[in-house]
Amino acid sequence: MSPGAMGFDPARFAAPVAAELQCKLCGRVLEEPLSTPCGHVFCAGCLLPWAARRRRCPLRCRPLAAAELRPVLPLRSLVQKLEVRCDYSSRGCGRVVRLRELPAHLAACRYGPPRDALPAGRAEGGGQRCPRERRGGGGPEPGQEMKREALRWSRREKSLLAQLSALQSEVQLTALRYQAKFGQYMSHISSITRDLTGSQRGKVSADPRRLLHGGAAAPGARPAAGRSVSGVSVPAVTRATRSSRV
């Protein structure tokens, strides 16, 4: 696998790998699988940058945020149990080991690159090195082991940087959303305030007391005692009504 690339090369596995264990973005076997809320699974190194840039599931089924992604540990464990060929199979190693056991095997594989620290065929004391040592099987070489460790850390660093970038983008997007919501709320409050102010002004202008002061009676209002209605005194009408009853 090339430095920085995510996913395992399907050709390295001893048996065909099911499509469910392959990333739909890179086409390789899942490495550090992450799941979207809609249930699709991709390599972490593939999905995180995608989510940060496009904010949508790669299969275009729904919007997506980096904070919604979840690791799928059962799938990771399943992939780690798959058998792969040794990296030095082209040198003659026919070993097939589980993926999780591969680093330990490579460190001790007798078909690994020869050691460069000593001249070929010579040991530190000047004597002859055994055939196993000449073939590089005397243990892990410091240079090769350091390169493998550097590669692992490089990939880990890129994955973490992708996660950090995705989270920063998510925070910025959330802040913009809240800012837009706040603007909408303030506009709504201002509109309600204007409506209430206009309603209060309308009530004051239509006050019945002002109408009475202007000489007109409000609809349904009873005439006051002593005042005339259509030129007839109210007390006179009352007395006439009582005498007719007697």
Image: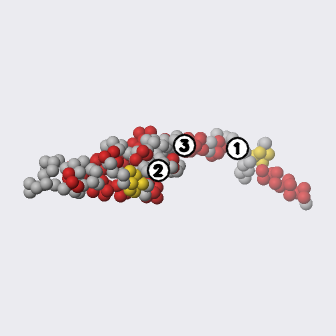
In the picture provided, is 16 more to the left or to the right than 143?
Answer: right
CB under 8 Å between callouts 1 and 2? Answer: no
At label 3, the amino acid type is Cys
In depth, the one of 132 and 76 nearer the eye is: 132
Q: Residue at x 27, y 56 (%)?
A: 108
Q: Residue at x 51, y 47 (%)?
A: 19
| Earlier residue among tags 2 and 3 | 2
In the rendered view, tell whether residue 23 sits above or below residue 131.
above
Circle 2: is it few (<14), some (14-19), or many (20+) Cα within 10 Å?
few
Circle 1: is it few (<14), some (14-19), or many (20+) Cα within 10 Å?
some
* Nearest to viewer (mark 3 / mark 1): 3
| Earlier residue among tags 3 and 1 | 3
Spatial CA distance of label 1 from label 2 is 100 Å
Marker count (numbered): 3
At label 1, the amino acid type is Ala
Residue farthest along the bottom direction in this orientation: 246
Residue 51, picture quadrant: top left
In the rendered image, residue 124, in percent from the top left (x then y), is placed at 10, 55
Label 2 element class: loop
Which numbered tag is attached to residue 61?
3
Spatial CA distance of label 3 from label 1 is 70 Å
Label 1 element class: loop
Q: Which residue is disc 1 drawn over?
A: 217
In the picture provided, is 113 more to the left or to the right than 228?
Answer: left
| Earlier residue among tags 1 and 2 | 2
